Amino acid sequence: MKFDAVIFDWAGTMIDFGSFAPMGVFVEAFARFGVTATIEEARGPMGAPKRAHIQAMLAMPSIRAQWQAEHGRAPTEEDVDAVYAIFVPMNEAVAPKYATLVPGAKSTLDALAARGIRVGSTTGYVRSIMKGVIPVAAAQGFSPECIVCADDVEGGRPGAEQMFLAFEQMSLNRGAKVLKVDDTEPGIAEGVAVGAVTVGVALSGNIAGLTVEDLMALPDDERAALLAKASGILRAAGADHVIETVADLPDLIEALEAKG
């Protein structure tokens, strides 16, 4: 078997080790409305389009109760829009600062190119947020053929629309042999939705939520436990394979292609 293309996620997969760029912004955006959100709560819906992410956070019992107490009513769709309107410009400013490639990402891109495997991407970010991220990543060697943002389609992750648009923009047929690589459950789900071979990234993304330095400092047993936890979550979401980071992708592809 020969793979035609890989569709990568961005934050937590190819850039922003630990997926930190949105976290503080979610917390600050809710704080503007008198609500204290934890980093754990902010990480929960990660991978979904950001408006849907805010909607999911507002449905969490603790956040919903705080909103009720602060505003005298349950949150509405208008409130989702209000928080989102605060969130987007804040994240536009922050995201480029976290756009450093994950260690090993560039060597993986080089290995894919050597195999003739094309590279596309989807992201839970809207295009205005990606505007500042794209040139920073490009300067480091990551310039995928397509960048399908959450607001490029009507329905984003976990549905198939972003992946179908990526296929269209890359002129890939529905039967193409494609890998979808992602660190989140919704991102894996969008790969499942189009029949791609799905690869979960366990240690560089949102589930682990650690910097490179903090991950390296973990004792072996804690690292193993974190890997097992993240792998279980990603496999439950539909991941066919789980790797630690994108640095491990070339070895996985070599093994899969060798099996035929």
Image: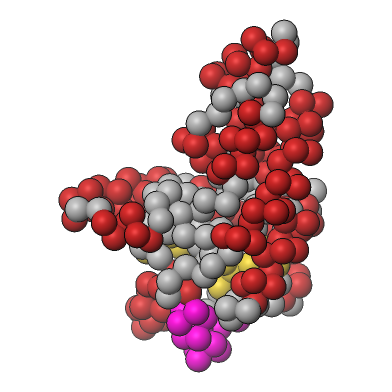
Asked if the stretch drawn in magenta spans residue 57, the answer is no
Which corner quadrant holds the C terminus?
A: bottom left
Is any part of residue 155 visible from this angle? no
**Which residue appears farthest toward the bottom when viewing the image?**
114
Name the dominant secondary structure of the magenta segment: helix
Percent from the top left, x then y, of residue 117?
55, 83
Give the answer, above or below, for where 133 lies relative to 39.
Answer: below
Give the image's coloring scheme.
secondary structure
Q: For residue 241, what is the image quadrant?
A: bottom left
Viewer-proximal residue, 246 or 18?
A: 18
User: Looking at this view, is 218 or 228 the one in front?
Assistant: 218
Image: magenta residue range: 106-119
Which quarter of the figure has residue 239?
bottom left
Q: Could you tell me residue 173's position as x and y percent?
A: 69, 74
Q: Position of residue 122 (x, y in %)?
A: 65, 62
Give the residue displayed 57% in from the left and 78% down from the top. Answer: 140
Q: How many marks?
A: 0
Note whether 130 is above or below 45 in the view shown: below
Residue in the picture at 64% in, 53% down: 94
111 in the magenta segment = yes
One can see residue 231 in this view: yes
Answer left or right for 175 relative to 14: right
Q: Is residue 140 above or below residue 10?
A: below
User: Which residue is at a point 68% across and 38% down the rendered structure image?
Assistant: 52
Q: Is residue 54 left or right of residue 177?
A: right
- Seen at 40% across and 52% down, the residue is 210
